Image: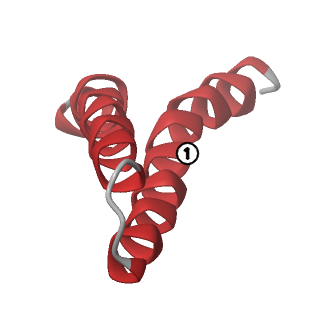
Protein backbone atom coordinates (compact mmCIF):
# COMPACT_ATOMS: atom_id res chain seq x y z
CA UNK A 1 0.00 0.00 0.00
CA UNK A 2 2.88 2.35 0.73
CA UNK A 3 4.33 1.68 -2.72
CA UNK A 4 1.06 2.74 -4.35
CA UNK A 5 1.01 5.88 -2.23
CA UNK A 6 4.54 6.66 -3.34
CA UNK A 7 3.75 6.10 -7.01
CA UNK A 8 0.40 7.91 -7.12
CA UNK A 9 0.91 10.68 -4.54
CA UNK A 10 4.59 11.44 -4.05
CA UNK A 11 5.81 11.15 -7.64
CA UNK A 12 3.20 13.56 -9.10
CA UNK A 13 4.06 16.07 -6.35
CA UNK A 14 7.75 15.72 -7.20
CA UNK A 15 6.87 16.24 -10.87
CA UNK A 16 5.12 19.53 -10.11
CA UNK A 17 8.07 20.68 -8.00
CA UNK A 18 10.53 19.69 -10.74
CA UNK A 19 8.55 21.54 -13.42
CA UNK A 20 8.46 24.63 -11.20
CA UNK A 21 12.22 24.46 -10.68
CA UNK A 22 12.64 23.93 -14.42
CA UNK A 23 10.77 27.16 -15.14
CA UNK A 24 12.72 29.08 -12.51
CA UNK A 25 16.11 27.84 -13.74
CA UNK A 26 15.21 28.42 -17.37
CA UNK A 27 14.61 32.10 -16.68
CA UNK A 28 18.16 32.62 -15.41
CA UNK A 29 21.08 33.78 -17.58
CA UNK A 30 23.96 31.60 -16.35
CA UNK A 31 24.84 28.47 -18.30
CA UNK A 32 24.77 26.27 -15.19
CA UNK A 33 21.10 27.15 -14.69
CA UNK A 34 20.38 25.95 -18.23
CA UNK A 35 21.95 22.59 -17.35
CA UNK A 36 19.94 22.47 -14.12
CA UNK A 37 16.79 23.34 -16.06
CA UNK A 38 17.25 20.35 -18.35
CA UNK A 39 17.96 18.12 -15.37
CA UNK A 40 14.77 19.24 -13.64
CA UNK A 41 12.83 18.72 -16.87
CA UNK A 42 14.09 15.15 -17.19
CA UNK A 43 13.34 14.43 -13.54
CA UNK A 44 9.86 15.94 -13.82
CA UNK A 45 9.02 13.93 -16.91
CA UNK A 46 10.20 10.72 -15.28
CA UNK A 47 8.16 11.43 -12.13
CA UNK A 48 5.08 12.31 -14.18
CA UNK A 49 5.23 9.31 -16.50
CA UNK A 50 5.88 6.54 -13.95
CA UNK A 51 2.28 6.58 -12.58
CA UNK A 52 0.95 6.50 -16.15
CA UNK A 53 3.14 3.50 -16.92
CA UNK A 54 1.97 1.72 -13.79
CA UNK A 55 -1.69 2.25 -14.75
CA UNK A 56 -1.05 0.95 -18.28
CA UNK A 57 0.88 -2.02 -16.93
CA UNK A 58 -1.87 -2.92 -14.42
CA UNK A 59 -4.61 -2.55 -17.02
CA UNK A 60 -2.81 -4.93 -19.39
CA UNK A 61 -2.77 -7.77 -16.84
Name the foreground residue: 58 vs 14.
14
Q: How is the image coloured?
A: secondary structure
The residue carrying pointer 1 sits among few (fewer than 14), some (14 to 19) or many (20 or more) residues within 10 Å by Cα, namely: some
Q: Quadrant of the C terminus?
A: top right
Q: Looking at the picture, does residue 47 appear above or below residue 58?
A: below
Query: Secondary structure under badge 1?
Result: helix
Residue drawn 51% across the image and 31% down it: 51
- What residue do we see at 54% from left, 41% from top? 50
In this rendering, is residue 58 above or below 32? Answer: above
Percent coordinates x, y for residue 60 in the rendering: 82, 25
User: Which quadrant of the view contains residue 59?
Assistant: top right
Camera-nearest residue between 6 and 36? 36
Q: Is residue 14 left or right of residue 56?
A: left
**Image point (22%, 33%), residue name:** 10
Q: Which residue is mark 1?
A: 45
Q: Give residue 33's quadrant in the image.
A: bottom left
User: Hey, which residue is sitting farthest bottom in the picture?
Assistant: 32
Q: Residue furthest left?
A: 2
| Rendered view: 13 above or below 50 | above
Residue 44 point in image, percent of width and height: 44, 46
Residue 47: percent from left, percent from top? 44, 44
Q: How many marks?
A: 1
- Residue 17, by quadrant, is top left
Residue extending furthest front? 29
Q: Tell me what residue is drawn at x 66 percent, y 26 percent.
A: 58
Looking at the picture, tell me which residue is in the foreground, 5 or 11. Answer: 11
**Residue at the extreme right of the image, as rendered:** 60
Which quarter of the rendering shows the N terminus? top left
Q: Locate residue 45, reporting x and y percent.
A: 55, 45
Amino acid sequence: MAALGFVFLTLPCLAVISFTCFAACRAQKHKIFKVLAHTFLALGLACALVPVGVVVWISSL
